[in-house]
Image (cartoon, rainbow, N blue to C red):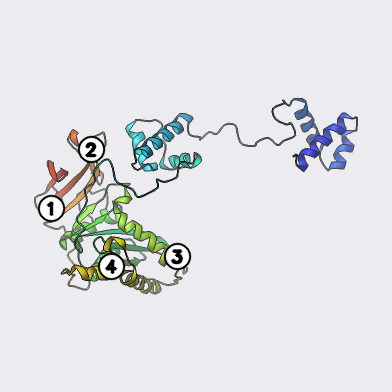
Amino acid sequence: MKNKDEQQRILAVQRFRDGEKPESICASLGKSRAWLYKWLKRQEHHDNEEPWCKDSSRRPKNCANRTPDEIEEIVKIVRLSLYNKEVFCGAQAILWELEDMDISPLPSLRTINRILARNELTHRRTGRYSPKGTPYPALPSAGVNDTHQADLVGPCYLKGPIRFYSLNVVDLATARCGLYPSVSKGAKSIMNGLWNIWKRLGIPDRVQVDNSFTFAGSPKYPRSMGPLIRLCLHSGVEPWFIPPSEPWRNGSVERFNDFYQQSFLGKIEMFSVDELKNGSLAFENRHNTTWRYSKIGGKTPVKALGSMKSTLRFPDPEAPPPDWRKEPEKGRYHFVRLIRSDLRLNIFGESFSVPPELEFEYAVATIDVKEQKLTISHDGKPVKQIEYKR
């Protein structure tokens, strides 16, 4: 069925063909002569496949920034291949595959996401995910404070308006959380936050974080040890840095961050820093005493802690020790890295060669501060040792 505009165009052309003057046609329809002549020309040159009275698409025939069709097809094929292998098949995984294939021009993550959305390739695998392929080194998590995962959420905003960040920490064994909100993400604020959280959760054996400047320190001085590394080593804690661009390796705290956003920031109105601090402590206590997790037998985090009957180690002073900024003389910190085809291991911008057998495997780089050695291990076995002097 033709719409009103299409019927008007057909009627105008018919009236002109019957000998009526253009002035009369245009005046009665409230249209210009250019409009009438446009549809007369369209009617004369139309083909039988598409009615001449319909609107034509205004979409440009050529798009200067459009991704080449060949690249788009490769992205679709790679995504389908990864999906069928039942491994990660998101934009980051696809980009890694394209890098290995030496594809040029290499699309950005944003472009890959647009291609997936445009071709309706964003659906996820159904059922529980079972890891396959390259094994990843797991940290101990059976005992209380064996391993903490930490992450910085933000910037977030109060209705004040006030911008703030929240340091969130999760103990893997008990699912206990610790929160520390701050208007700054500077080294002093983060170290005070970590210290305050340890005063409530206890000091862990390990803390796992991402490679952001907040935790890693300045990339200009890769061997200088950032503030988090120094505080941890002074406190007998071993920092572990997950591979870049793999946030799912910090999965427990990432899932908690979603819960924090939805159940706290998304539901409670706060207008001042004091309200934020009090609200964060109340939310932390409510989570640890009432939230239940299947991985700890349906217990709350506090009840899980009580059932394990562990002795916790707490900080002594009210604030971080004044010498935490000094370089530690002993201790170890670690980096997990996926070795690509270039056989290089990157630590804060500094690159080291690795043996060929580590290609496409996860390696652990351990820096021993006292020995000033960098040991590269795979599957728990050392494969290379390098001098690492500060």
Q: Quadrant of residue 112?
A: top left
Does residue 220 sit above or below 47 in this rendering?
A: below
Residue drawn at (16%, 63%) of the image: 235
Residue 293, which numbered label?
none
Q: Which residue lies furthest to the left in this view?
A: 371
Q: Nearer the viewer, residue 369 or 360?
A: 360
Q: Quadrant of the N terminus?
A: top right
Amino acid type of the residue tagged 1 in the rendering? Val
Question: Which one is in front in this view, the residue at disc 2 or the one at disc 1?
Answer: 2
Callout 1: SS:
loop
Residue hosting label 3: 266
Residue 119 point in image, percent of width and height: 49, 39
User: Are dots 3 and 2 in contact, CB under 8 Å?
Assistant: no
| Mark whose residue sits in front, 2 or 4 | 4
| Mark identifier at residue 369 | 1
Residue 158 appears at what percent x and percent y?
Answer: 44, 67
Question: Please, what secondary structure does the residue beneath circle 2 have?
Answer: strand
For mark 4, what is the residue?
A: 301
Q: Crowding at label 3, few (<14), some or many (≥20) Cα neighbours within 10 Å?
A: few
Q: Nearer the N terminus, badge 2 or badge 1?
A: 2
The mark that comes first in sequence, 3 or 2, is 3
The residue located at (78%, 43%) in the rendering is 4
